[in-house]
């Protein structure tokens, strides 16, 4: 196994990369309890992009873990979770934004940029705009669903050094927001670094 890319993403920062078919993206929660918002597109045709609806319907589960396949709106496989030491990841909590922060936490939070802003900044490098944003995956974010259907954003179940690994089923473009949220416990109220590693095959990631 060879390393193609190895980058530490700062707290609150965006990240993007093209991951070639058969290569594996490893997302490592360095300090624990850090949500990583994530979108994936077919690199050759970005109109084919991750669909939460197709992904959830095909696997019959709203949570992602080893074996889950991230599918496009046409039901094509984009990436497969091939390893997961955390155990459960969110598909329905969405991405924070200036607007949602204001609605949930008050107008005094409007100056705080969110994951939507990170997606727009990073997506612009690849010719993507607001219309290209869809419902996203939240790696490491804990969003339980209560018996009455209500959702909560609560303390994470991650820990320092935990890893989720995704194999690209075609050449894909991934957009990441290392979530800047400080108003709820999804980042332990203190956003921290994550490590993004791309390897040319499956296996354990070298220690960084």
Image: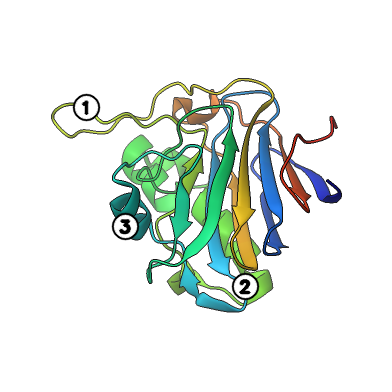
Q: Residues within 10 Å of mark 1 (few under 14, many from 20)?
A: few
Q: Which mark is residue 146?
A: 1
Looking at the image, which residue is at 66% across and 40% down?
A: 27
Q: Residues within 10 Å of mark 2 (few under 14, many from 20)?
A: many
Residue 68 vs residue 101, the one in the foreground: 68
Distance from Cα at disc 1 to Cα at disc 3: 20 Å
Of labels 2 and 1, earlier in sequence is 2
Contact between labelled residues 2 and 3, with CB atoms less than 8 Å apart: no
Image spot of residue 152 (x, y percent): 31, 29
The residue that disc 2 covers is 43
The relative height of residue 46 versus residue 186 in the rendered view (above or below) is below
Looking at the image, which residue is at 37% across and 30% down?
A: 153
Name the residue furthest left: 148
Residue 4 vs residue 96, the one in the foreground: 4
Image spot of residue 28 (x, y percent): 68, 34
Quadrant of the rendered image containing residue 192: top right
**Which mark lies nearer to you, 2 or 1?**
2
Image spot of residue 112 (x, y percent): 53, 44
Q: Give the position of the C terminus as an image quadrant.
A: top right
């Amino acid at each position: 196994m060879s390393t193609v890319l190895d980058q530490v993403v700062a707290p609150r920062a965006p990240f993007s990369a093209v991951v070639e078919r058969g290569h594996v993206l490893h997302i490592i929660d360095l300090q624990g309890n850090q949500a990583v918002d994530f979108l994936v597109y077919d690199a050759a045709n970005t109109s084919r992009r991750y669909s939460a609806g197709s992904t959830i319907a095909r696997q019959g589960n709203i949570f992602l873990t080893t074996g889950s396949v991230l599918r496009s709106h046409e039901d094509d496989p984009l990436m497969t979770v091939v390893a997961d030491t955390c155990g459960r990841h969110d598909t329905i909590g969405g991405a924070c934004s200036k607007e949602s922060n204001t609605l949930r936490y008050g107008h005094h939070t409007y100056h705080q940029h969110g994951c939507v802003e990170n997606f727009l900044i990073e997506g612009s490098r690849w010719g993507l705009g607001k219309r290209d944003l869809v419902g996203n995956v939240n790696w490491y974010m804990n969003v339980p669903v209560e018996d009455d259907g209500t959702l909560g954003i609560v303390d994470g179940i991650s820990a320092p050094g935990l890893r989720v690994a995704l194999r690209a089923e075609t050449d894909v473009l991934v957009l990441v927001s290392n979530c800047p949220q400080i108003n709820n416990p999804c980042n332990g109220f203190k956003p921290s670094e994550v490590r993004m590693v791309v390897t040319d095959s499956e296996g354990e990631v070298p220690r960084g």
